Amino acid sequence: MATIDELKEQTTPTTPLFLINCVLSSGSTESWGTHAATFSGTSYAARLLKHTLFQLTTSSTDGLDGAAQISLTLANADSHFSEIERETGFKGAQVTIQFLFYDFVANAAASEARVVFRGICNSPDEITESTFRVTVMNRLNLQRIILPDTRIERSCPWSFPSSPAQRLIALTGGTKGAYSSLYKCGYSPDQTGGVGNMNSGTPFTNCDFTRTDCVARGMFSTDASSNVTARFGGIEFVPAQILVRGYGERGTQLSPLFDNLALYNDFVPLVYGTAWYMPPIVFSRNDGNLTRMEVLLGMGEISGILQVLVNDIAIPAAQNGTNMTATGWYSLISAGTRNGGFDPNFTDSSGNPL
């Protein structure tokens, strides 16, 4: 068998091939390649559509003589990788990439295999109907994960518990406490002190992460026992059009609709300590006289808001029971909920929620 160094000097060598072994956090292994092949008793599916393995750097800022990270674009027309991301997740998976020359006529390797990259997966960067793009960090890189780790999306980003053991972790957090991937959802109707709705006497075992399913499971605002939940993490609301009349106008007109100004797949802010920052606007509507908007403050526990500026003008905090039609801001951070809540009783003089 010829070596890689010998074959690469030939005018017409056999097919160069990248083979990827991905060990997920659950212990299961996925095997992919640029072509379908069998090597050392392992079958590799033809899933790799695009990669950045050849984008190497010299004297990089992080001290690596090679790729600090690579991007892999995988074929996902059958939602194979989407299902893996929902069930297990790619974050923390260990990836090993080998290079070799392969003879597809003889259906056998034409050279030895050489490991060209080892790294750790982050959460997927992009999921479409046909592709799945994920970034893999070099294992020698000191920055192993991407922060913040939650993105703005229409569907709920939290993991749904499907078994009694997982629902117990969703209630208590288990050994990881509030940092458990199931704790943010919290669906646990069959556990003592748990929340959520049953499905004809038995717990739900799956969720499609939409508002409709969240309401059915009692995790959108309150459950059947009137427990406050408010766990839905998606951002999808677009207000309905209403008839408005601006100051000095005689007739009425439909209010314009504003899409979310925050772009989907943007990161949810992560703020430490006390700081000034510009949170993304996720809701905005003008009624002809006033503009109401909602901003996404960030992930994690937030003790409070000290000041709000809009166009360099300080906005006073709203007072419950006081006419705040002209101006005022109100925090949706609610005591007793993990992800913030919405108080429908806090309204202006016209009954509109603030």
Image: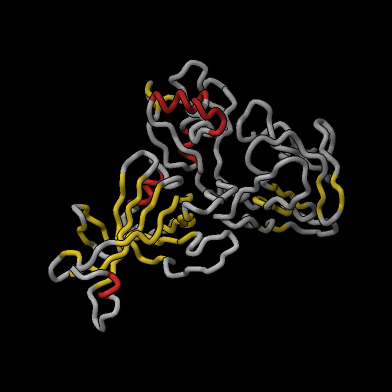
Give me the residue at 25% from left, 81% from top: 10
Measured as percent of width and height from the top left, residue 292 is found at 74, 49
Residue for point 53% across, 20% down: 225
Taking the view exactly as shown, the residue that stands out farthest to the bottom is 11
**Picture mark count:** 0
Using the rendered image of the protein, determine whether residue 299 is visible from the camera's viewpoint.
yes
- Along the viewing direction, whichever of 40 and 242 lies nearer the viewer: 40
Q: Quadrant of the N terminus?
A: bottom left
Q: Say which quadrant the C terminus sits in.
A: top right
Taking 7 as reference, is 59 left or right?
right
The colour scheme of the drawn protein is secondary structure
Vertical relation: 45 (above or below) 230: below
Measured as percent of width and height from the top left, residue 234 is found at 55, 44
Query: Does 40 sit left or right of 332 as displayed?
Result: left
| Residue farthest toward the top in the current orientation of the protein | 192
* Nearer to me, 79 or 214: 79
Left or right of 98? Residue 312 is right
The residue sitting at 83% across, 45% down in the picture is: 327
In this rendered view, identify the residue nearer to me: 162 or 57.
57
| Relative height, residue 37 to residue 344 (above, below) | below
Instruction: Choose top left, top right, bottom left or bottom right for residue 129.
Output: bottom left
Question: Residue 278 in the image: x percent, y percent?
Answer: 73, 52
In percent of width and height, residue 337 lies at 62, 29
Identify which residue is drawn at 52% across, 23% down.
172
Is residue 219 at least partly visible in the picture? no
